[in-house]
Amino acid sequence: MNPHEVPCLRLLIPFVAGLGLANWLDAPVTSLQTVLFVWFALGVLLSLRAFSYRWRWLYGVYLHLLLLAFGYHHFIRHHELRQEHHFRAQLNTGRQWIGVVYEAPSQGKKVKVPVRIEALCLAGSDTLQTASGNMMLLLEPGPCADSLRYGNRILFQASPAPTEGPKNPEAFDYRRYLHYKNIHYQAFVKPDSLRLLASHQGWAAWETAYSARSRLLGILQRYFPETTEYAVACALLVGYTEDLSDELRTAYAETGSMHALAVSGTHIGMLYVGLMFLVGRLQLRGNGGRAIETGLILAAIWAFTLLTGATASVLRASVMFSVYLFGRLLWREASAWNVLAASALLLLLYNPYLLFDVGFQLSYSAVAGMVFFYPRFYKMFPPMSRWLDEPLKVLLVGVSAQLGTLPLTLYYFHQFPVYFWLSGWVVVLVGAVFLWGGALLVLLDALSDQLAQALGFLLNYMLWGMNKAIFWIQELPGAVVRDIWVPNWFLPLIFLGLAFGGAALATRRGKWLMGLAGVLILWGVQQSVATWQHQRQAQLVVYHVRNGRLVDIMDGEQLITISSQLNEKQENYAAQAYRTACGVRKGIRLSPSDSLEYEGRHLFVRGPYVQFHDIRLVFIDTLHPVPIVRTDVGILSQSARKAHIGGLFELAIFDATNSRSQSNRWQEACVRLDKPWYDIRQNGAWLLKHFHH
């Protein structure tokens, strides 16, 4: 790849470096905007001068530094907390708030409504004050929440609070997730505290997109009566995934097919191929014909984007294909790497926080994998008949995309789907048929009810078969390698190893294989050190779980769990990530009761009492309100009404099952008795390790 053929990639690298540096430092630089303006003006003047060839590199360095500084400034300036008149200055005095819903609300246990604040009414005053900033409103499902739409201006009464970080070690960081959505405050709103002031306050294009998506969902509901098939149909055609069950999500994730359930580059690619075939039948000639062909395809792609609700994944793909089509129109053959970099540059100029969006990272990694690996893999096979060649292409595209996303898959999801290549044939074939079949179904719905019913029946049966195939692949022996933990510092090394492997494949030089071998050796050393640490660990963790008790005791690689009133999903959500990080597997499970007994090498349990190494603790709850044996730690649960803070334990721990008022009363008692305490509800999980032997 000649660097001069990919100018956008050369511009993207220092710009992304600036974004990453700003995310790491998170510190504004005084007068950087003025400095950038002067640097830019000087750069323009320098570009007009002719330099000796040997000094041209100085201008390249200057340009790269300018782009790095611009990326830094662009990222820092995008932070909503640095907006003028941000509402956090009036957080404690705001009584009523006025804002506009700027994205479609999402359904779940709580309805989440992102609102852009416009004004607030201070307590003790009836006048409005201008304000800015974003807020996530949480509402109970019901008529009030269901009636909210994009573009609604609403008046509501609430007490916003900063978003909270994870309460359990290594758990999903919802605060960080919302930070990259530029949301830093949330509020619970009661239905009777919210009033609609006006509608249609957003962009008309987005309103059209969300309205079209709602109509499409209604059509699909008529022709796919079963919940499972309806959920998959919505995901495949519209990119709407909120109706997918946990069972479906797990099956598609563990077979490497989750990308099929979000309208993305795969769908836009299939649409593009079909459109090229249709437009090719028009036999347009010359530059004018190419311009008309490009215009028709672009119009169809963006119409599809709006009809599917313009989700983030389909927007990324649409921008990517639009850049490619423009490049093809202007220069006949546009470099795929240049197209990839140009589309990423455009999206990051629009929203620099996309760089840290998992979907953005996976999309571009997958496309980069396909661009680099697919043609090289394909050349390894001899020519064959079309009936063998097409399935081979599907297989190689899937393998290439999986290679591109491999580091991120291991890092974010801690698993690797072994049979992704098999499920890829299923979802790509069915996805292609369903995309065009679904479009025809929408058309027939308006023209012929009988034909639409017949087509709907066939498509419904096809989705049923695809789901059965995915569940079958999931049940194959060794279908997924689980519990893979990649430390933060090792992720760049995995990408480096992938780059070494790619260079060896492209150049056929052994020196690159030496680099890959070096990374693999480092991986082996890291795993050996981690295993040694796991075998020597001794940890006790009381997790933050509001509706039950969850305690993990890690003795080497053995796990002993004390749990009550929790199902598997709740337990995994709280603890699975940390268990994976600690290298422990499912072990012995105990439920606290009067007759609870267990004895191990370093663990002794009798009823509410536990001794692990030289640490003694007691569970104090409604069944065991008062300890009768002196211990080191007392864990108070379920607002044990008769429990009191006495002298029979040294440290008082209040778990998350307690009410806030009861925890506060116990804290006051601890202060009076000069006894240390720890509130899990407020501070997150309590973790003790490095015991004395």
Image (tube, grey):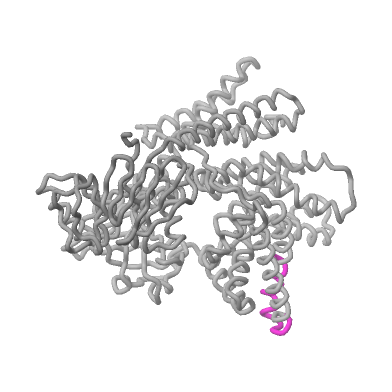
Quadrant containing the C terminus in the rendered view = top left
- Image height of 367 relative to 121, above or below: above
Residue 449 within the magenta-colored segment of the rendering: yes
Q: Give the farthest residue toward the left.
A: 672
Q: Main secondary structure of the magenta part?
A: helix
Please give the name of the residue rendered at 62% of the width and 71% of the height, measured from the top-left corner. 229
Residue 204 percent across, percent down from the top left: 51, 65
Give the magenta range. Answer: 435-451
Please give the name of the residue rendered at 54% of the width and 66% of the height, measured from the top-left corner. 245
Regarding residue 690, the answer to whether it shows in the image is yes
Quadrant of the rendered image containing residue 334: top right
Quadrant of the rendered image containing residue 406: top right
Residue 641 within the magenta-colored segment of the rendering: no
Please give the name of the residue rendered at 21% of the width and 49% of the height, measured from the top-left corner. 652
Residue 45 percent across, percent down from the top left: 54, 26
Quadrant of the rendered image containing residue 314: bottom right
Residue 119 percent across, percent down from the top left: 30, 59
Please give the name of the residue rendered at 56% of the width and 68% of the height, measured from the top-left corner. 213
Residue nearest the viewer, comparing 313 with 358: 358
Residue nearest the viewer, comparing 593 with 269: 593
